[in-house]
Image (cartoon, rainbow, N blue to C red):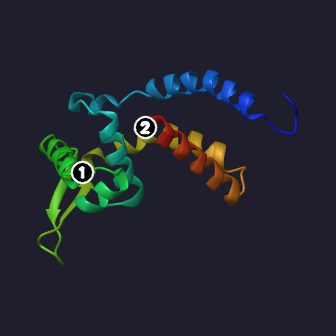
Amino acid sequence: MSTDGLSVDEGVRTLLLFMPRMVSRVKRIRVPEELQSFNLAPRHLSLLAFLLFDGPMGVNELASRLKVAPATVSLMVGDLSRSGVVERREDDADRRRTIVRIAPEHQTSIESWLAKGAHAWRQALEPLTPAERKLFVDTLAAYERALAE
């Protein structure tokens, strides 16, 4: 491997060896004890991450960000709402719209659950220029799309 960069094959080999270790470490991030009884799945983690980082939002906006149908988000929000992890309320400006937020009593637990991953990403991304960050994120998105094909 040269110090100037990687060939495509060197990059593929390195990432194929690296990714399982990274995924394994991410899977070992424990759900906080106070959230374990809710049977949270990875799809819930993504939804909760949007609510944590971007604040309360509507079901349609969540569906757009998660790239799933609004009905799917409604079902997830219903599950999380019944268990008390999130709260739903009618939008005062548009009564047809439902606003979803993390229930205040679970905010700290969810923050601590996501903190390790957020800290690791921050550590990895901070040394990069904005253009390098965009390239990295775009590359991961392209990899995800290629896996889905």
* Residue at 40% across, 27% down: 30
Picture coordinates of residue 148, whole percent (x, y): 43, 37
Residue that appears at 88% across and 35% down: 3
At x 27%, y 33%, the residue is: 40
For disc 2, the marked residue is 148
| Element under disc 2 | helix
- Distance between the alpha carbons at the discs numbered 1 and 2: 33 Å
Q: Give residue 57's quadrant in the image.
A: bottom left
Residue at the front extreme of this rendering: 149
Q: Can residue 58 be seen at all in this image of the molecule?
A: no
65 vs 41: above or below: below
Q: Is residue 126 left or right of residue 84?
A: right
Q: Is residue 94 visible?
A: yes
Q: Name the residue under label 1.
A: 103
Give coordinates of residue 38: x percent, y percent: 22, 32
**Relative to 114, 32 lies left or right:** left
Q: Tell which residue pokes out farthest to the right in this image.
A: 3
In this image, 46 relative to 88: left or right? Answer: right
Please tell me which of labels 1 and 2 falls first in the chain: 1
The residue located at (67%, 29%) in the rendering is 12
Query: How many marks are shown on the rendered structure?
Result: 2
What type is the residue that disc 2 sits on? Answer: Ala
**Residue 149 falls in which quadrant of the image?**
top left
Residue 9 lies, in percent from the top left, at 72, 29
Q: Give whichever of 47, 145 is nearer the camera.
A: 145
SS label for mark 1: loop
